[in-house]
Amino acid sequence: MKTRGQIEAVITETIMQKTCENDDRSRSIGANRNRRLELFSAFIITLVLINCNTAAPIPTAAPNPTATPSPTTHREIVTVDPGAVSSVTITLEALNRVEGEIRVRGGLGNDIDFWITDPANDTIVNPARIREQRSFSFKASISGNYSLNFGNTFTSRVTKVVDTSYTVFWR
């Protein structure tokens, strides 16, 4: 498709050619009438072409932006029986960051063993005995399921309740 400038140049050139042709003709009344009719026709054609070429373009839909999720906060309450291990699974993408806190209730010391494993079952937060509460954080190195593990294997009588809250920060 020609641009507006290209169309105007073609029409201007056509008008100039017609004007020169008419000047070469005799200046009779009929020739002047034909010249005016040709100029008027060229003018109308110019207006139509310019209007067609400069009409507002048909809008195209812009692609939807990829949404970046806001941080999401979760809360889980886990019961850990005596001699058992329980887990909370978090599905993450690589480079997501997790910050959280655990609170333990039950038994004399309100304590539990706590560690975090990655999708390859490698320990990324080393096991530690937690008394009452602890904060934790880590960054996902690969995509997949990460586990917050709670072990009550050191007791054979007391059930523990672990209240876990964590926030996932998307990369």
Image: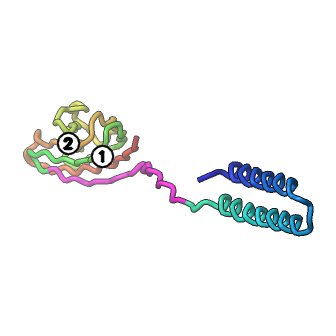
Q: Which residues are magenta?
A: 60-80
Position of residue 145 in the picture relative to residue 64 (left or right): left
Nearer-the-camera pick, 168 or 171: 171
Disc 1 is placed on an element classified as: strand
- Disc 2 or 1, which lies upstream in sequence? 1
Q: How many callouts does the rendering have?
A: 2
Q: CA distance from mark 2 to mark 1?
A: 13 Å
Q: Residue 137 at what x, y percent from top left?
A: 34, 37
Q: Residue 171 at what x, y percent from top left?
A: 40, 40
User: Is residue 70 at all visible to an observer of this figure?
Assistant: no
Disc 2 is placed on an element classified as: strand
Q: Residue 100 at what x, y percent from top left?
A: 35, 43
Residue 150, above or below 16 = above
Q: Residue 49 at what x, y percent from top left?
A: 69, 61
The three-letter amino acid code for the residue at tag 1 is Arg
Q: Which residue is mark 2?
A: 149
The three-letter amino acid code for the residue at tag 2 is Asn
The verdict on residue 76 being magenta is yes
Nearer-the-camera pick, 95 or 105: 95
Q: Are marks 2 and 1 in contact (CB under 8 Å)?
A: no
Query: Which of the two discs, 2 and 1, sits closer to the camera?
Result: 2
Q: Which residue is mark 1?
A: 103
